[in-house]
Image: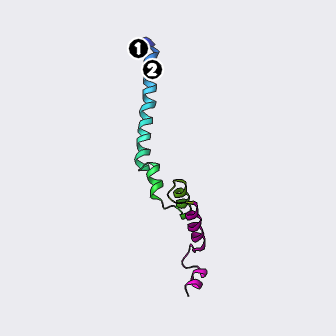
Amino acid sequence: MFYMHAAGWGWGWWLVMSVGMIAFWALIIYGIVWLLRGRPAEDRDQARPQPPEQILKRRLAQGEISVDEYERRHAAIRETPRNPTSPKHEQTAA
C-alpha cells in the first residue's frame, strides 16, 4: 500500500524534498532579515560618528600623523570640555 502512495520514488525523494523545503524556508527568512536590516554592517559602522580619540588612534596607526602630532592633539582633546553647557565651559568662556 505504501508503494502505491509513494509512486515508486523511494526514500531518496523524501530526503530531497525535505532538504529542499529547509533550504526554501532558510532563503525566505534570510531575505526578510536582509530587507529589514538594510545596509551591510560596514556601511552602518561608517555612518556612526566616532569619538575623537578613536579617529586619532586610527590616523596614527595608518601613518597619517606622527606620534608628536598624536600626543599634541590628544592633549587638546582632553582639555576640551565635552558638554558645552557644563560649568567648566562657562567659567572659561567668561
Residues at marks 2 and 1, CA–CA distance in whole angstroms: 8 Å
Camera-side residue: 19 or 78?
A: 78
Disc 1 residue crowd, few under 14, some 14–19, many 20+, Cα 10 Å? few
82 or 72, nearer to the observer: 72
Main SS, magenta region, reads: helix
What residue is shown at x 44% (from left), y 58% (from top)?
A: 47
Decide whether residue 27 is among the magenta residues: no
Amino acid beneath label 2: Trp
Q: Residue furthest left?
A: 7
Question: Cβ–Cβ below 8 Å for labels 2 and 1?
Answer: yes
Q: Quadrant of residue 29?
A: top left
Q: Which mark is residue 9?
A: 1
Q: Quadrant of the C terminus?
A: bottom right
Q: Amino acid at mark 1?
A: Trp
Q: Is residue 25 above or below residue 1?
A: below
Q: Which residue is mark 2?
A: 14
Between 30 and 61, the residue placed more toward the observer is: 61
Q: Position of residue 28 (x, y in %)?
A: 41, 38
Q: Quadrant of the N terminus?
A: top left
